Image (cartoon, rainbow, N blue to C red):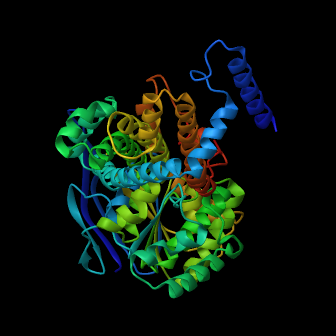
Amino acid sequence: MKLLVKDVIKSFATGDRVVDTLDNVNLKVEKGEFVTIVGPSGCGKSTLLSIIAGLEKPTDGKIYVDGREVAGPGPDRLVMFQESALFPWLNVLQNVEFGLKVSGVDKRSRREIARHYLKMVYLSRFESAYIHQLSGGMKQRVALARALALNPDILLMDEPFAALDSQTRSLLHAELETIWEETGKTIVFVTHNVEEAVTLADRVITFSARPGRIKKEFHIQLPRPRNIETPDLGRAINRVMEELKTEVEKVVKEELDSDWAVEESALLYSNNCRMGSGL
Amino acid sequence: MKKALFFILIIAGWEAVSRTGIWADYLFPSPFSVLATLFNGFKDGTFTIAIIASLKRIFKGYLLSLAVGVPMGLLIGRVKFFSETVGSLILGLQTLPSICWLPLSILWFGLNEKAIIFIVVIGAIFSISLSTEAGVRNISPLYLRAAQTMGARGWRIYLEVIIPGALPSIITGMKLAWSFAWRSLMAGELLSSGVGLGQVLMVGRDLADMKQVVAVMLIIAILGLTIDRLIFRLLEGQVQQKWGLARL
């Protein structure tokens, strides 16, 4: 077992009210497994990822990686964020080198490693470009290269492709799949896009909202590379979607006027499967 | 081209006014007599010596205010205790023109070099601190989180993320501070003593030699402008190119 999330509770105090973002979350992830966590916006899935990364402390509970307790952020668990979080004062190559530089790798070898991973994401030509010159998809490619360059055991991905157009996104899905198979990383991928979650994962974990807890697990045992057109995948997507429907309604009901009601199987089954995040 | 024409017109107007004789020549010198004064001043070394002395002072004072101001801004921007104490003090001090410190400065350091440098430092330091602070505060927390997950800790975060991230704002502050420093220096030199451009200007006043006063005024303006163009435009241009900000 690579990663163990044990009895994690996270609550925030907002004013005089305490909001339970995460309520007793337990999760085991095996080495090399691709796990996606899917749930409505604001269900605490990103908070869980931050806690695994060590960027936030849980109110209670512990995280173990290889049996050792996680005390803070570290390069063994790299995070890829929704916005690329690339540094605008560095060029592409320097961005990919950043982690290696911080960990004291000498200039020549870190350059070599960075070039290797830039090649893996097909951006060798842009190594001296600045970040503002890249498109959204290119930025996420650089961010992926930057994460891979540190050779982390676990890759934590926080809706990394959410801001991209759908063509770019499916291209990156395919490439991520390939890279994952080549490198054997353990990936925990958070998204609100069910289609994305099911296409990528070995295991999909659905999250319920307020308090955030794990609702159900789906093992997706379908051959790779996966094609969104195959009926098996479509059925799997529908199963997960059905499970999440009530959760999305719950969140939306809290946000909208009380006379709002979901039209049976209409809204949530539209093609983009965004689960009401844009409502 | 437009610029050149504009300045030629100004000089022509200046010459025309001096020829009308509204003011006597010693009160309103013609551009040519100022040019002659400039030429003679550089020839006998008066201006050169004064320029070097003034530049030395301002660089000393300016570098000192950078060396203190940037760390101070970092502290105010990052540590709550400092922002609540030193931060509010600085905001108050910045509204005070630095020349107001001259009486105290002369008493503390004596009628010398140090007193003027102190005025320059006081003039420049607060705008550097405040802009550094603003830069630090505006860094996206995402950058810090990303750097942390990549294993950056402590001083490395400052060196590799916070300072480069705040740099555009710091440079803006440096530019502003340069003009503050330049003004403070001239005020200090006018009112204090020692060799320098301000002193040459005052000598011109004492001798009722307006040619010299205007010549020094020109030198001061051109020097300040040149350094702004040479150093700060260059720095700004580089940052804008990297960050993809529009050229101002």
Q: Residue at x 67, y 63 (%)?
A: A170
Q: Residue at x 68, y 20 (%)?
A: B18
Q: Which residue is drawn at 55% across and 64% down?
A: A90
In the image, residue B35 above or below residue A157: above
Quadrant for residue B64, please give it: bottom left
User: Residue A36, how many percent across, how many down?
Assistant: 48, 64
User: Residue B101, how many percent across, how many down?
Assistant: 26, 34
In the image, residue A242 above or below residue A257: below
Quadrant for residue A75, please give it: bottom left
- Which residue is at the far left? B108
- Which residue is at the far bottom? A109
User: Residue B105, how many percent across, how many down?
Assistant: 23, 39
Question: Taking B63 as reference, is A171 left or right?
Answer: right
Quadrant for residue A155, please give it: bottom left
Front-lying residue, A150 or B46: B46
Front-lying residue, A109 or B228: B228
- Image label count: 0
Front-lying residue, B215 or A100: B215
Q: Which quarter of the rendering shows the N terminus of chain B?
A: top right
Q: Which quarter of the rendering shows the C terminus of chain B?
A: top right
In the image, residue A79 above or below residue B96: below
User: Residue B70, how many percent across, how many down?
Assistant: 35, 52
Question: Taking A72 as reference, is A99 left or right?
Answer: right
Q: Is residue A274 at all visible to an observer of this figure?
A: no
In the image, residue A189 above or below residue B2: below
Front-lying residue, B11 or A194: B11
Q: Is residue B189 at all visible to an observer of this figure?
A: yes
Question: Taking A250 as reference, is B118 left or right?
Answer: left
Q: Residue at x 52, y 30 (%)?
A: B209
